[in-house]
Every structure is written in C-alpha cells, then in structure tokens.
Image: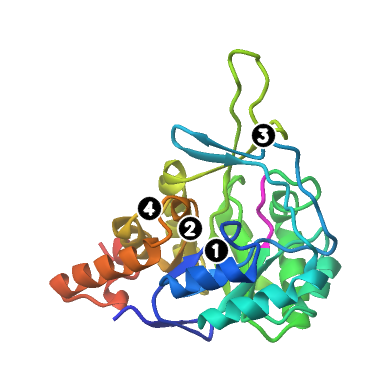
C-alpha cells in the first residue's frame, strides 16, 4: 500500500532518512534501512576532507535543535566504501553532496556510485557553500545542469527556506534538469547564553530543525507543488505519522525524517505501520493523499 516509484527508484514506502542524521557511516545507514526506511540519504560529502565548525556544534532548544556542524566529511574519495555498505540494507542510497561551484558538484557526482544525488545548496551556516550558492537561481540552474551531465543517476536539489521566494529557486532547479526537489533544509537561527552573553553555538549561528519548522516546510512544499512539474520531497519537523500524511497532502511525493530519529530509531516502522492503518480505515491510497490540500 505504501510502495511507490520516485524518480525511477522503487521505494517500499515514502519515508526516507534525511541527510545529516546517522549518515556518516555505512553501518549506521544500513541500520536505518533495516529499521524500515524506504531510502537513506548520506551526510553531505564534499571535494576535500573537512573538520567542520568548533563545538558546541549542536544544541537542543525548547522547540527543536540548533546545529552548525560546518559540513564535516571525509571527502568523496574516502566515502564510496560507506555507500557500498549502506547498500547492504536493501534500499536506495542517496548521496548528499556539496561544493562551491558547478565543477566541484559534477566532479563528485561523476565519481561516486549512488542510486541518486541530493545537491546540498541549502546549508545555512557554511561559508562559501550551501545557501550562499543556493539562494542564486542562476547558480542553482548551472549546478543542477552540470550534475545532470556528469551522472545518469537521478538528481534531487535540496532547497533553502532562507530566501524570499523558494518557488523561484525550485523553478531554476527544474530548468537545470532536476528530477526532484527536497524542501526544506534548516532555518537560519541562533541562541544566546544569558549568563555570559555569548552565542551558544561555536559558529554563533546555525540552523533550526525539529518540530518548530514543520509549518514553514509545509508551506514551502505546498507552494512548490503548485509551481513545479517535478516531484517535491518534504522534510522538516516530522515526528509522527500525522506529520508525514500532512506533508503528502501538501504535495510531497515522499518525506524525509531527521531530528526525530534521535529520539526513536524505530520511527520509520512506527510511522509506516500507523500510516497503513490510517489509510486502510479511510480506504485511501498514496495517490488519494497526494496533493489533497490543493483539491479543495
């Protein structure tokens, strides 16, 4: 009942692990796959090994999590083995990649073997990368086209909410040949310690994730569904099956779960079983749920 085909990939359900959560090693990705995820997305991987920002790089706040990891990674040249191990989980493995230019993105995509590539043009706290690239429609289109020319695998573009009009960035990705867009990455945010007056994060600011950003993500998915011909993958604040259903009704073909995995490693099985029960009771299919909010 929950199986689907997405950009040519067969998924047993529309639930995926989001980039940045348990995606550093093949073993952790395999564990999530075996725990019920329909697909898994790696940590963002770049051209060179990167240590990331100084600690504290992730803190819990009342409404979610703040993180400023700074894109730490071992470089794509040292990561293929982890993707190969992740494939043992039996679900599609999507490589999240980042770069400072179209050439860097295409070099990585042309070298790694993955079932799809998710282009991180949306990280809010890495100088020279992420949202600094992804807020320019022309750059997003160029990067997307370069990656499409470098690989035969599907190309997904992960969008930042930290722009005036996310639809314009989504249209640029579509014009560049993207097979899907992913919405959204974290929302730019910060916290300050009132005892010292210092920002809590080592990088001073970072990105907010968790339940607090779900309404923002829902609106972005809703808008992108109306603007684009390609599928939208929803992410941001999903903590139970109701959230997943809401995203699909807003126009998401599939969803990714990130922060909530930290509290419940079994969340993919929990969400999928509850979704199936709900849909059986309503006598609905995924197609019935898809885009329901636009049909009223």
Is 202 located above or below residue 233 in the figure?
Answer: above
Picture disc at residue 143: none
Q: Which residue is at the front of the view, 251 or 59?
A: 59
Is 1 located above or below residue 42 in the figure?
Answer: below
- Mark 2: few, some, or many residues within 10 Å (few <14, many ≥20)? many
**Residue sitting at 16 percent across and 76 percent down?**
283
**Residue interval drawn in magenta:** 120-124
Picture disc at residue 239: 4
Q: Which residue is mark 3?
A: 205
**Disc 2 or 3, which lies upstream in sequence?**
3
- Residue 166 lies left or right of residue 134; in this view the side is left
Is 68 located above or below residue 38 in the figure?
Answer: above
Q: Are marks 1 and 2 in contact (CB under 8 Å)?
A: yes
Instruction: Decide if residue 241 is in sight here.
Output: yes
Q: Main secondary structure of the magenta part?
A: loop
Q: Which part of the image, by quadrant, shows the C terminus?
A: bottom left
Picture disc at residue 182: 1
Occupied quadrant, residue 192: top right
Instruction: Decide if residue 294 is in sight here.
Output: no
Q: Name the element at disc 1.
A: strand
Q: Name the element at disc 3.
A: loop
Cα–Cα span, label 2 and label 3? 21 Å
Picture disc at residue 235: 2
Q: Name the element at disc 4.
A: loop
Q: Nearer the viewer, mark 2 or mark 4?
A: 4
């Amino acid at each position: 009942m929950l199986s689907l085909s997405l950009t040519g990939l067969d998924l047993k359900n529309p639930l995926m692990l989001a980039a940045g959560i348990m995606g550093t090693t093949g073993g952790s990705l395999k564990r999530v796959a075996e725990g019920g995820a329909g697909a898994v997305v790696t940590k963002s991987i770049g051209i060179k090994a990167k240590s990331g920002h100084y600690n504290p790089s992730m803190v819990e706040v009342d409404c979610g999590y703040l993180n400023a990891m700074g894109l730490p990674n071992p470089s794509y040249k040292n990561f293929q083995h982890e993707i190969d191990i992740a494939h043992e989980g039996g679900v599609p493995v999507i490589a999240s990649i980042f770069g400072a230019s179209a050439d860097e993105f295409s070099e990585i995509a042309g070298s790694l073997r993955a079932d799809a590539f998710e282009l991180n043009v949306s990280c809010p706290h890495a100088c020279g990368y992420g949202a600094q690239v992804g807020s320019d429609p022309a750059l997003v289109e160029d990067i997307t086209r370069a990656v499409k020319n470098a690989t035969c695998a599907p190309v997904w573009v992960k969008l930042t909410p930290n722009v005036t009009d996310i639809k314009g960035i989504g249209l640029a990705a579509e014009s560049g040949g993207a097979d899907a867009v992913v919405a959204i990455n974290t929302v730019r945010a910060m916290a300050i310690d009132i005892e010292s007056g210092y920002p809590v994060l080592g990088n001073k600011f970072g990105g907010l994730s968790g339940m607090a950003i779900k309404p923002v993500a829902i609106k972005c998915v809703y808008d992108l569904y109306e603007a684009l011909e390609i599928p939208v993958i929803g992410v941001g604040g999903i903590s139970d099956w109701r959230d997943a259903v809401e995203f699909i009704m807003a126009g998401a073909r599939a969803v990714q779960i990130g922060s909530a995995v930290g509290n419940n490693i079994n969340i993919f099985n929990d969400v999928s079983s509850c979704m199936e029960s709900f849909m059986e009771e309503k006598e609905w299919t995924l197609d019935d749920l898809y885009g329901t909010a636009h049909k009223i």
